[in-house]
Image (spheres, rainbow, N blue to C red):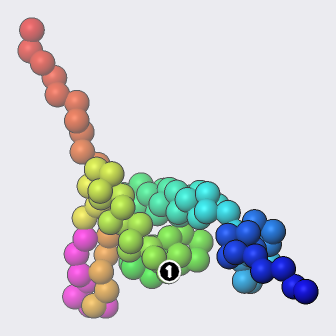
Amino acid sequence: MTKKISYAEMLKSKPLTNFFESQPYNPSDRIIDLETRRKAVLDLLSDGQKHKTSEISSQETGGTDGTRRLRELRAEGHNICKEKDAETDQWLYWLEKIDNFKSEEV
């Protein structure tokens, strides 16, 4: 006779796996990956130059959700500007550095 087990018990005995890599799924890996991608986008924009969406969404930088990384960086307080290039009809993004230092007169 086959013993019936709950779904939770089944998951404990057989952890979820990443379909493509056949490794156990670890939610913290996703958080690390998102932080790494967010940092890669910030590093790209830190040169002060304007960058196309295709650069930000490249596999080496922000991945397919590169523009989402931009929104996350804005939410963290980074001043990311954008404008549409009239010639190529693509959005361009850059990081505008703000000098928060205020001199005080004595």
Answer whether residue 85 is magenta in the image: yes
For the residue marked with disc 1, what is the amino acid?
Answer: Thr
Q: Position of residue 69 (x, y in %)?
A: 41, 66
How many dots with numbers?
1
Q: Is residue 83 left or right of residue 88?
A: left
Q: Position of residue 45 (x, y in %)?
A: 41, 61
Q: Is residue 41 left or right of residue 101?
A: right
Which one is nearer the viewer's eye here, 86 or 2? Answer: 2
Q: Is residue 24 left or right of residue 102?
A: right
Residue drawn at (30%, 58%), measured in percent from left and top?
Answer: 74
The quadrant of the picture occupied by the C terminus is top left
Q: Residue furthest right?
A: 1
**Residue 93 lies in quadrant:** bottom left
Q: Residue furthest left?
A: 105
The quadrant of the picture occupied by the N terminus is bottom right
For the question of whether residue 23 can be seen, the reply is: no
Q: Position of residue 38 (x, y in %)?
A: 47, 60
Q: Which residues are magenta?
A: 82-88
Judged from the image, the secondary structure of the residue bearing numbered disc 1 is helix
Residue drawn at (39%, 79%), measured in percent from left and top?
Answer: 53
Residue holding disc 1 = 64
**Residue 29 lies in quadrant:** bottom right
For the question of whether residue 19 can be seen, the reply is: yes
Residue 25, above or below 99: below
Which one is nearer the viewer's eye here, 8 or 58? Answer: 8
